[in-house]
Amino acid sequence: MDIVIRAISVMAATCYFGLLLHQPKSTLVFTALIGWLGYEIYLLAGSGLLAFFVSGLFVGLLCEIVARKVRRTTTLFLISSIIPTVPGLGLYRTMMAISENKLDMALKIGLDTIGGIGALALALTLTTLVFSIIRPLKRTSNHKETK
């Protein structure tokens, strides 16, 4: 039952964030499913830096594939889908530790949070890079075949 509540809440948060950004309603179902699957991958991978990276790769890959299938831009799906995985709690805890003058704890939590953000950014960049390399290769091979 816990997984059902988590799935519904993650998908609802993803959809509401998409609505906040005026995302087309026809894309919200895809965005919600990708966000939920990315969050579950993050939890299954253990909630560390590797979990952020693997989840980011998975979300980036799904967003690229879905964007090509429905002929929309990748960022349309990506911005809302990655929200459940963003380490916002780490940022909040860092600010709380700073406000309580616990600078050692703030530094530790802050570095972990920045590492998670960096792992997400690297994973999303890698998936975009791979798909941007694949696309011109397909066009070049199709162009050669028609001659």
Image (spheres, rainbow, N blue to C red):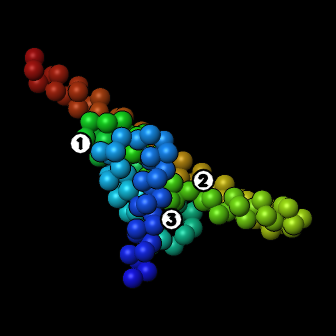
* Residue type for callout 2: Ile
Tell me the CA gap for discs 3 and 2: 11 Å
Would you name the residue on which mark 3 appears? 51
Do tag 3 and tag 2 residues touch (Cβ < 8 Å)?
no
Q: Residue at x 23, y 32 (%)?
A: 138
Would you name the residue on which mark 2 appears? 117
Q: Quadrant of residue 133?
A: top left
Q: Residue at x 57, y 63 (%)?
A: 49
Label 3: few (<14), some (14–19) or many (≥20) C-alpha neighbours in 10 Å: many
* Residue 33 locus on image (x, y percent): 35, 59
Per the rendering, the mark at residue 69 is 1
Relative to the observer, which residue lies in front, 32 or 90?
32
* Residue type for callout 1: Lys
* The N terminus sits in image quarter: bottom left
Q: Earlier in the sequence, mark 2 or mark 1?
A: 1
Q: Residue at x 38, y 56 (%)?
A: 32
* Residue type for callout 3: Ala
Tell which tag, 2 or 1, sits nearer the viewer: 1
Tell me the CA gap for discs 2 and 1: 28 Å
